Amino acid sequence: MPDRFFATASKKRKRPSSSASAPRKKAATTNGKLRSKGPSSGVQQPKKRSARDEELSDATDDDRGLGGVDDMDLRASDEDPYQSGSENENETPAEKRLRLAQMYLEGVKTSLADGEYDAAEIDKDLVSARLKQDVLEHSGKVHLFVGDSYDFEVPPISLRTRGHRFTVTTAVASEDGKFLYTSGKEGSIIKWDLRTGKKLSTVYKKRSVKGKQKADPEGHTDEIWTLALSSDGKYLASGGKDRLVGVWDVETADTISWVKGFTGHRDSISCLAFRKSSQQLFSGSYDRTVKLFDLSVMGYVETLFGHQDFVTSIDSLRGETAVTCGGRDRTVRYWKIVDETQLVFRGGGRSKLRDLLEGGAFEGMNDGEGDKPREKVQKTYIEGSMEVVCMIDETTFVSGGDSGSISLWSTQKKKPIYVQALAHGLHETVSEERGTITSPRWITAIGSLRYSDLFASGSWDGQIKLWKLDQKLKTFSLVGCVSTPGVINSIQLLSVPKGVTYSWGETKKGSLLLVAGIGQETRMGRWIVIKGSGSFNGSLSFIFSPRT
């Protein structure tokens, strides 16, 4: 008999006699046999329906002249619409891995053939080298030791862009080396053609009406402090004092189009970073939180808690990790997104016992045997704030603070591996009461050439300094300086892609591009104001050619 699940009447009725139900049975049978739901006819009858079920009409489809449910073929189709045509239902996991590996190798050969190699020249050695490089890149262990390949003593070729009224807070170039984006404290974003230095498009600050602010104003209404560009060059993210994370579509050559604004932060947006080769975006704020967004679906993912002060800088590479520094809480935190854990690295601070052992407590005191004072110990400065951070690879990163020191860190140790004190010297201030006061110039910007031994730092001493790591990533040393008047608010290093040429400078194979955002004030305040001496509000781009 038919399954009672498909019964149309909910009221209990007596079973009709065989003679009375003959017409009904005829409609519910096919060739004198009952149609069953599955391949087996011995289906167990379900329990009686509860009286609370919704009461249905007694009129059936048969009464309306329509085909009954029993006449419909409810069996699932043998063809799975979601199954790949190349997959076999009897395929074992080993066979599937083999098939996917073959597809990957074909993709590698195709990419090599599209590049600088001919298809006939592709052999096992080239494919093997490419596979090893991919494995190292995904594990975060590949390093390009290129620090000795450049002669930084030779003045580099430079491009200067000027278009902002106030201080330029960030300058970021696309990875293909074609476009440059700058933001300023006046609330505007400018897109430049980096190959010619021509201005392509400008987005201005939106006027906000007090008490009538829109949920998504399609732009920023206050100062813009930070920019971040996705690896594919499709999305540009911006943030600032209006607490809005803005997303712009910059894929078109000469336009900047608003896509969406993410709210959620309760204070100013201080830093942004895209995860390399993805569309995952990290944002840091003065509300002491870090938020993660996925721009592939234009959605919010999660919030990371831990910092006890403003999040001042953030960076991320290929792995599902990020590193942040928390200002006055004097910590650098390494976030493992998948594991939902964090590693805390504490910087700054010196114990009184250490000062006593090193002689700092006796500075300026006589030795008691003569009038000669005890030899003075070099004065040290306590790090009170962690300002900037940058990743070298997946497990190594560098940070800079208000003590003027640059620290090299590894995820394997809680303390810095190496510290370069007073990297940008001392700043002198004349006081009427105390005379000349010296204080360290803190590190205002830092950037690295990804997965290499080269990074750069900036302050307001009039130059960007380039540093080279040793091959064991244990120490670093100064290899060159570039004259840059003003306050350095951002630094980016990247290799010039093959085939990209610039009208303002000659490039060679392996050339290095350095982009810096420069202003007369610091990025998030007016603690330092530099006027005169050639300082300006804009960006500087430098090309370093390898040694011949």
Image: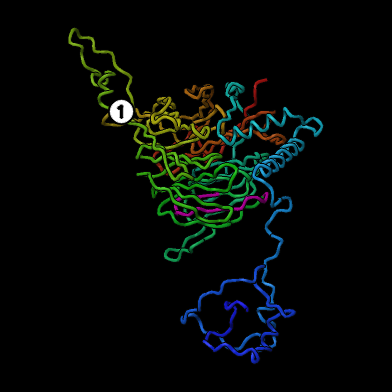
The residue most toward the left is: 368
251 is within the stretch colored magenta: yes
Closest to the observer: 383 or 137?
Answer: 137
For the point 61% across and 90% down, the residue is: 17
Q: In the rendered image, which quarter is residue 123 located in? A: top right
Q: Position of residue 219 (x, y in %)?
A: 53, 57
Q: Residue at x 67, y 39 (%)?
A: 195
Q: Is residue 291 above or below residue 136?
A: below
Q: Is residue 158 visible?
A: no
Quarter placement of the C terminus: top right
- Where, quadrant-wise, is the N terminus in this rendering? bottom right
- The spot of residue 223 in percent (x, y) is 47, 50
Q: Which residue is mark 1?
A: 350
Q: Nearer the viewer, residue 355 or 279?
A: 279
Residue 367 position within the rendered picture, expressed as x and y whole percent measured from the top left: 20, 11
* 295 in relation to 533, above or below: below
Point out the residue furthest to the right here. Answer: 120
**Residue range corresponding to the magenta coloring:** 237-253
